């Protein structure tokens, strides 16, 4: 892993020092646009053709929708221990996201003027769950669980089938536990197009959630004027703030845990302790060598691993806020003392007993988080992503009179005479 001083990193050179992979969709834009147009024009037949081309599976229209019997069979195929673990995780996810709920509210902004907000769930959403290199039932829980809490009535899910025309049974079990009843065997850009436009079989949705490869992200970006989308997810990231009290083995284990997904994942330690940095350098090779995904981890740490020396905790915080990591672990002597100073992070994990994998799976916090520095302006997935917040205004006669003068002055300045007259008409009627 590279070692640098905090003084060597700033806003202008951060992109050169930390090699975050931003999906370059320009090279595939034309191909993706062709897929989107084909699905829009030819519906199910286009999906069937792409399943054969990209997934090497021959489907017909009747195969696209997962049948009730397939969901029932999935429960028989999945290890009962995994089913119990998924149910346990979902309970905590539900409990955590239930706490985010807010009732409608009103306040009197002026005498006789009541303003407030109501919350209404998006009526139909689409979920995309990858199924290429591996199966991620936890992502189903993280997306569909909060949607259910938010009150979304209809959830449509797409995930690519294998060559036996099946979706991984663990994904089906997770979906079923979250109340997802409509599941399609569709992957890639064509899945995003199908949910955005609708086909003979696939229902059109209003907003699409879920991670995917560059083809999926390109499709979401290109269709963002047709359907609302979440934030495209990039490679995973972890940044650890450490000091002389940090256990170097914990730091190494946590780095490795977050870069084993993909060689483009990022692992960073920011530390006041030169001894800790030396311990990590001296011991990390042995730890990686014993890992099941040693090749992926080695490549990630070599190309995107970084050890940053800082003079004090304040500088650690400044560097972390500059990088804005997806996952931030604070493994210092007093982690809560630092918490108030953190402004940019997808999710924060406090203390040596709180490694990121707990949040990835079972703690209840959401693992669908902003990457690539976008934690400076975006939040992790929460129930408000599934809600529409609608302003409500109610005025009595006193309130109307209270607002009339300022409304009329501003309307006149902006040249909108009808705005002014809509208020004045009421005033005149009240005076009679």
Image (spheres, helix red, strand yellow):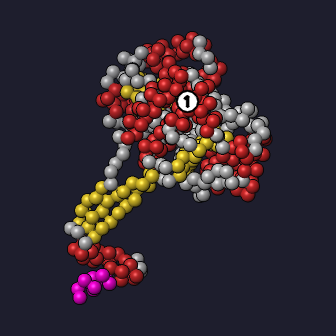
Label 1 sits on residue: 266
Is residue 250 a member of the stretch shown in magenta? no
What crowding class fits label 1: few (fewer than 14 Cα within 10 Å), some (14-19), or many (20 or more)? many
Name the quadrant of the N terminus: top right
Quadrant for residue 244, please give it. Answer: top left
- Work out whether residue 284 or residue 99 is closer to the camera in this orientation and state it: 99
Quadrant for residue 431, please give it. Answer: bottom left
Which residue sits at x=30%, y=62%?
115
Asked if 264 appears above or below 50 in the picture, the reply is above
Left or right of residue 414: residue 184: right
Quadrant for residue 409, please give it. Answer: bottom left
Examine the rendering and report whether any part of residue 427 can be seen: yes
* Residue 266 at x, y percent in the picture: 55, 30
* Residue 373 at x, y percent in the picture: 50, 40
Magenta-drawn segment: 424-432
Examine the rendering and report whether any part of residue 359 can be seen: no
Which residue sits at x=54%, y=46%?
155
- Work out whether residue 276 or residue 85 is closer to the camera in this orientation and state it: 85
Q: Main secondary structure of the magenta part?
A: helix
Which residue sits at x=35%, y=40%?
99
Name the quadrant of the C terminus: bottom left
* Residue 56 at x, y percent in the picture: 77, 36
Asked if 401 appears above or below 264 in the picture, the reply is below
């Amino acid at each position: 892993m590279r070692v640098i001083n905090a003084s060597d990193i700033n806003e202008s050179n951060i992109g050169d020092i930390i090699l975050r992979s931003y999906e370059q969709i320009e090279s595939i834009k034309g191909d993706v646009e062709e897929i989107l147009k084909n699905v829009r024009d030819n519906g199910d037949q286009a999906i069937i053709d792409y399943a054969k081309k990209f997934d090497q599976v021959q489907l017909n229209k009747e195969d696209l929708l997962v049948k009730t019997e397939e969901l029932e069979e999935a429960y028989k195929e999945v290890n009962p221990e995994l089913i119990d673990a998924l149910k346990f995780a979902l309970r905590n996810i539900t409990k955590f996201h239930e706490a985010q709920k807010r009732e409608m509210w009103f306040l009197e902004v002026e005498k006789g003027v009541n303003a407030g907000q109501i919350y209404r769930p998006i009526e139909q959403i689409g979920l995309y769950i990858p199924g290429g290199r591996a199966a991620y039932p936890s992502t189903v829980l993280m997306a569909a669980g909060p949607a259910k809490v938010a009150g979304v009535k209809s959830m449509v899910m797409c995930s690519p089938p294998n060559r036996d025309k099946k979706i991984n049974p663990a994904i089906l079990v997770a979906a079923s536990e979250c109340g997802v009843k409509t599941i399609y065997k569709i992957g890639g850009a064509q899945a995003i197009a199908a949910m955005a436009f609708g086909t003979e079989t696939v229902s059109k949705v209003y907003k699409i959630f879920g991670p995917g490869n560059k083809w999926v992200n390109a499709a979401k970006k290109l269709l963002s004027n047709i359907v609302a989308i979440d934030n495209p997810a990039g490679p995973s990231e972890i940044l650890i703030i450490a000091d002389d009290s940090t256990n170097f083995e914990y730091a190494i284990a946590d780095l490795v845990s977050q870069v084993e997904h993909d060689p483009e994942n990022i692992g960073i330690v920011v530390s006041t302790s030169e001894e800790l940095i030396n311990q990590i350098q001296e011991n990390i090779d042995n730890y990686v060598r014993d890992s099941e995904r040693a090749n992926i981890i080695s490549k990630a740490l070599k190309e995107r691993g970084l050890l940053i020396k800082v003079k004090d905790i304040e500088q650690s915080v400044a560097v972390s806020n500059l990088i804005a990591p997806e996952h931030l672990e604070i493994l210092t002597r007093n982690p809560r003392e630092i918490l108030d100073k953190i402004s940019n992070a997808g999710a924060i994990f406090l203390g040596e007993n709180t490694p990121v994998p707990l949040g990835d799976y079972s703690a209840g916090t959401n693992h669908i988080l902003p990457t690539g520095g976008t934690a400076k302006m975006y939040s992790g997935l929460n129930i408000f992503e599934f809600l529409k917040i609608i302003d409500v205004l109610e005025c009595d006669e006193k309130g109307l009179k209270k607002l009339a003068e300022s409304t009329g002055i501003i309307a006149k300045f902006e040249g909108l005479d009808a705005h002014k007259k809509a208020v004045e008409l009421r005033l005149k009627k009240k005076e009679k």
